[in-house]
Image (cartoon, rainbow, N blue to C red):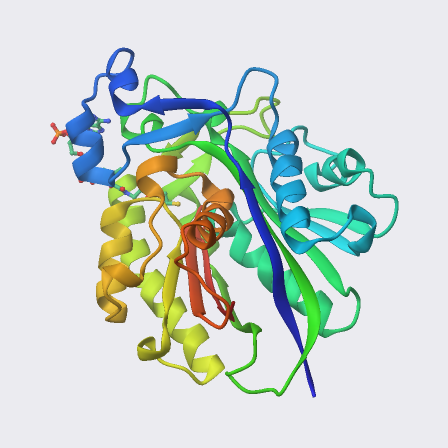
Amino acid sequence: MTIRAVVRGVGHYLPDRVVPNSELEATVETTDEWIRTRSGIERRHFAAEGQTTSDLATRAARAALADAGLAPDDIDAIILATSTADLTFPSAATMVQAALGMTRGFAFDVQAVCAGFVFALANADALIRSGQARRVLVIGAETFSRLMDWSDRTTCVLFGDGAGAVVLEAAEGAGTSADRGILATDLNSDGRYRDLLYVDGGASTGTTGHLRMQGKEVFRHAVEKLAQTAHAALDKAGLTSADVDWIVPHQANLRIITATAQRMQVPMDRVVLTVQDHGNTSAASIPLALSVGKARGQIKPGDLVVTEAIGGGLAWGSVVLRW
Ligand SMILES: CC(C)(COP(=O)(O)OP(=O)(O)OC[C@H]1O[C@@H](n2cnc3c(N)ncnc32)[C@H](O)[C@@H]1OP(=O)(O)O)[C@@H](O)C(=O)NCCC(=O)NCCS
C-alpha cells in the first residue's frame, strides 16, 4: 500500500478588473501586436486598490474547498506559494487561515517565485506521504502588478494578478503509475542565476522594489530546463511523454510553452493555455490553469497531468500527477 496525495478539489479567483493590451498602449510605449506576438498575452487581471494577495488566495481557497465539499477545519495544513505576500511577515498563509476561520492545523508560505506552486505541491506531497497531514490546501496567489516598474516596457506588459488552489487528500494507492494523485516530483534551483530575474527591494533596502529581468536569457534557460525537468519527473514515475494527457505549464509566454511542448513531443491540443487571458501570474498561474482546465472540461478524472515551471532563482521543477 502506498499513500498518494490526490486532488480532491480545485478553484480559482481572478480580480474583476481586466486590462486588455489596448489599455496599456495608452500609458506604455507598446502595442497590442508586440505583446501578442512576443508573449501570447492578450489581457490580464489587476487587483483592486487595497485587495491583497491573501484576499485573492482566500477566495481561491474557498472555491477549492467548495469543490472538495470540505470545511476549513477539515484541512490540516495550508501551503501558500507567493512572492507578493501582503507583509514581510506573518506569512500570507496564516492570514488565509484566519480569513477562512480555520482554528487548527498549520500554515506557511513557500517562496520559489514562478516555480512556487510546483515547490508547494512537492512539499504538500511530502507532508501527506510522511503522515504529517491528511489534507493540505495548496494555493498559488500573487499581486505582481504591484512589483512592476511602469517605465520598463520590457517587463510591465507581461504580468498579472490572480490565485488558484487545490485540496490534496491522502488516499491509498497500489504504488503504480496507474494510481491517482501525485506520482513524482522534480525540484531544482541554481542561485548563480539570481541576476536574471529578481526584485530590487527587500529587507536589505527597506523598500518593496521592482521586478528586473533579462528576458532573453530567462527565455533561453526556460526552454532548456522545463523540458528537462518534465522528463525527469516522468522518468521517476516510470512514464514517458506518450502517456501525457495534459501539460499544465507555467503561463509566462506562449513561445516558451510551445517550445517546451515541442521538445516533449506533446501536441499543443494537449496543453492547457490561459496565458492569453491571465498573463504571467507567477506562482498562481499553474493552479489557475488547473482550475480553468477542469472547468473547460479539458482535465478529467484519471488524466495524466504534467505541470512545469521556472522562475527567479533560478528555480524550476515539475510535478506528474494523475487527476
Ligand atoms: C521579454 C520577451 C517577451 C522579449 O521578447 P524578445 O523577442 O526577447 O524581445 P527583445 O528583448 O529582443 O526585444 C525586441 C525589441 O522589442 C522592444 N520591446 C521590448 N518590450 C517592448 C514592448 N513592451 N513593446 C514594444 N516593444 C518592446 C525592445 O526594446 C527591442 O527593441 P530593439 O530591437 O529596437 O532593441 C522574451 O524575452 C521573454 O518572454 N522572455 C522570458 C520572460 C519570461 O517569461 N519571464 C518570466 C519567467 S517566470
Which sits in the foreground, 299 or 183? 299
Can residue 261 be seen from the camera position used here? Answer: yes
| Residue 301: image location, x then y, percent | 50, 68
Question: Above or below — where is 313 with respect to 59?
Answer: below
Which sits in the foreground, 2 or 7? 7
Query: Is 33 situated left or right of 211 in this image?
Result: left
| Residue 81: image location, x then y, percent | 59, 46
Question: Above or below — where is 143 with respect to 220?
Answer: above
Question: Above or below — where is 307 with respect to 102?
Answer: below
Tell me what residue is drawn at x 84 percent, y 52 percent.
Answer: 105
Tell me what residue is drawn at x 65 percent, y 29 percent.
Answer: 86
- Residue at the extreme right of the image, as rendered: 103
| Residue 270: image location, x then y, percent | 30, 63
Query: Is 132 situated left or right of 205 in this image?
Result: right
- Residue at the extreme top of the image, as rendered: 26
Tell me what residue is drawn at x 67 percent, y 36 percent.
Answer: 58
Query: Is 220 situated left or right of 109 in this image?
Result: left
Question: Above or below — where is 291 with respect to 44?
Answer: below
Query: Is 114 situated left or right of 98 in this image?
Result: left
User: Which of the 4 image quarters holds residue 63?
Assistant: top right
Which sits in the foreground, 180 or 133? 180
| Residue 228: image location, x then y, percent | 35, 69
Which sits in the foreground, 321 or 218? 321
User: On the rendering, which quadrant does ligand 1 occupy?
Assistant: top left
Can residue 203 be seen from the camera position used here? Answer: no
Tell me what residue is drawn at x 25 percent, y 39 percent.
Answer: 39
Q: Quadrant of the N terminus?
A: bottom right
